[in-house]
């Protein structure tokens, strides 16, 4: 599969290496062959020195409480509101307020997507958009509901484990959009197929759309993991006890298409972020997808 480029985010491209610290970020940064080889070597070493089965069993047994513990510590101060959503996913702006729209966000956390959507669409004045949002963490949902912008007239937040395959409080074939932002990577890859298959049935046939963004292979976060954090290929345990998985572009396409979705977009977002004060380079790789239910 030929790698598709993402549309330029601000069209900021690095043409001269000496200018690298003149801005905070650069778009579509290509890797040298040497960089790719170095990244592969790091990942191979991580896998060779992966955690023991005994340690993985301990991590696995603590997973049910890991996200509640995360939000007990960080509350609503860890993630920033995702204002970039509407540049990357303009589908989240309701162009015709006379047309109803129903959206579900899975893995909503404390509302860093939901509240920008509420504000941007001025939902206090628009009754034709309704938002469902769920998260595995009951603590996160409690924090979300305490936000002054939360209103049950246009939003319903609830606790839900998307790996459980239990019924959602949503009719099948009824959703216009499902949002998954850095969510699937937190789930063991053995469950990815059943998660996507279960969610797809809630999208409107021929119309409902999955909006997806998550970690790509060789992202800076992957290369920074120390020994004994790798569980299996491209799957790691974070220090807080949660999981993170790094996807290949083709892998996602196969996952979505074999579970009833048709590709509209599947692109690699290669970003070079820099810390100008510390003269640090940070290579980020994210995958962004839009798939429509067949």
Image (spheres, rainbow, N blue to C red):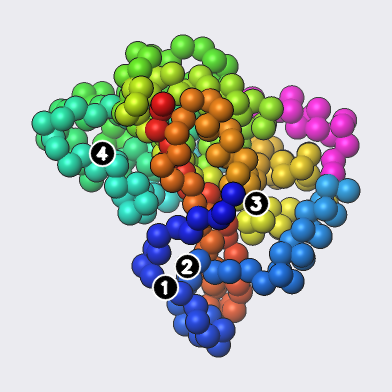
Q: Quadrant of residue 104?
A: top left
Please, is residue 3 above or below residue 165 in the view?
Answer: below
The tag earlier along the polypeptide, 2 or 4, is: 2
Separation of disc 2 and disc 3 at Cα? 17 Å
Residue nearest the observer in this picture, 162 or 6 = 6
Separation of disc 3 and disc 1 at Cα? 23 Å
Label 4: few (<14), some (14–19) or many (≥20) C-alpha neighbours in 10 Å: many
Give the residues in magenta: 50-67
Residue nearest the observer in this picture, 57 or 148 = 57
SS category of the residue bearing label 1: loop
User: In the orientation shown, which residue stands out farthest toward the front?
Assistant: 1
The percent coordinates of residue 21 (x first, y second) are 52, 81
Q: Are marks 3 and 4 in contact (CB under 8 Å)?
A: no
For label 2, the residue is 27
For label 4, the residue is 118
The tag earlier along the polypeptide, 3 or 4, is: 4
The percent coordinates of residue 40 (x first, y second) are 77, 58
Separation of disc 2 and disc 4 at Cα? 29 Å
In the image, which is nearer the foreground, mark 2 or mark 4? 2
- Residue at position x 39%, y 63% from top? 9
Residue nearest the observer in this picture, 54 or 85 = 85
Q: Are marks 2 and 1 in contact (CB under 8 Å)?
A: yes
The tag earlier along the polypeptide, 1 or 4, is: 1
Q: Are marks 1 and 4 in contact (CB under 8 Å)?
A: no
For label 1, the residue is 12
Separation of disc 1 and disc 4 at Cα? 30 Å
Q: Is residue 292 left or right of residue 198?
A: left
Please state, as top left, top right, bottom left or bottom right, where the C terminus lies in the image: top left
The tag earlier along the polypeptide, 2 or 3, is: 2
């Amino acid at each position: 599969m030929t790698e598709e480029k993402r549309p330029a985010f601000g069209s900021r491209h690095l043409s001269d290496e000496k200018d690298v610290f003149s801005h905070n970020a650069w778009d579509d940064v290509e890797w040298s062959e040497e960089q790719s080889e170095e990244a592969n070597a790091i990942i191979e070493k991580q896998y060779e020195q992966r955690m023991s089965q005994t340690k993985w069993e301990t991590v696995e047994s603590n997973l049910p409480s890991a996200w509640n513990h995360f939000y007990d510590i960080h509350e609503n101060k860890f993630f920033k509101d995702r204002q970039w959503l509407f540049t990357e996913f303009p589908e989240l702006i309701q162009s015709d307020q006379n047309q109803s729209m129903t959206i579900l966000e899975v893995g909503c956390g404390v509302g860093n997507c939901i509240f920008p959507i509420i504000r941007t669409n001025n939902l206090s004045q628009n009754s034709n958009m309704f938002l469902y949002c769920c998260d595995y963490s009951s603590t996160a949902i409690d924090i979300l509901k305490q936000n002054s912008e939360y209103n049950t007239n246009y939003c319903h937040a609830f606790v839900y484990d998307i790996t459980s395959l239990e019924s959602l409080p949503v009719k099948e074939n009824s959703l216009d959009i499902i949002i998954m932002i850095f969510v699937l990577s937190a789930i063991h890859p053995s469950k990815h197929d059943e998660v996507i298959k279960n969610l797809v049935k809630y999208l409107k046939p021929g119309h409902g759309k999955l909006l997806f963004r998550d970690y790509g292979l060789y992202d800076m976060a992957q290369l920074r993991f120390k020994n004994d954090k790798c569980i299996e290929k491209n799957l790691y345990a974070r220090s807080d006890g949660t999981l993170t998985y790094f996807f290949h572009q083709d892998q996602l396409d196969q996952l979505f298409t074999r579970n009833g979705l048709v590709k509209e977009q599947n692109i690699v977002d290669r970003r070079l972020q820099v810390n100008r004060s510390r003269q640090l380079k940070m290579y980020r790789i994210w995958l962004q997808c839009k798939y429509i239910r067949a």
